[in-house]
Amino acid sequence: MKLKKISLKKNQDQLSDSDMKQIRGGASVSSWCGSGQYLYTCYTSFPSGANTKGDICASTSNEAKSKIKGNLGGSGFGEKELENITINCE
């Protein structure tokens, strides 16, 4: 498995470009994203059973999740509803 070849240093915020190329399904560098950002593919699952897939530019997967939650909150979802929505970004 390619993931075993990557050794992360303590307090390392991001993987290098060469490290990212070794991860299957990981975020990728994109001309659509700003400097220091990667294009993440995120999967969102709603309690109703609906699932969505989309891409977003962010520095980390946690930032990508936070941006999506912010967008959902701005679309009318309340705090209680957001707690029941699952978001996974890779």
Image: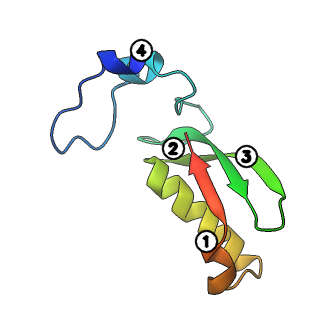
Q: Amino acid at mark 4?
A: Lys
Of residue 60 and residue 1, the one placed in the foreground of this image is: 1
Image height of 19 relative to 84, above or below: above
Residue shown at 61% from the left, 71% from the top? 70
State the count of labels.
4
> Mark on residue 34?
2
> Mark on residue 83?
none
State the CA–CA distance, disc 3 to disc 2.
18 Å
Location of residue 30 by image quarter: top right
Mark 3 vs 1, N-terminal side: 3
Q: Amino acid at mark 1?
A: Gly
Mark 1 vs 4, N-terminal side: 4
Circle 2 SS class:
loop
State the CA–CA distance, disc 1 to disc 4.
33 Å
Mark 2 vs 1, N-terminal side: 2
Residue 90 location (% of width, % of height): 55, 39
Between marks 3 and 2 in the image, the one whose residue lies nearer the viewer: 3
| Dots 1, 4 in contact, CB < 8 A | no
Which residue does the numbered mark 4 point to in the structure image? 2
Which residue does the numbered mark 1 point to in the structure image? 70
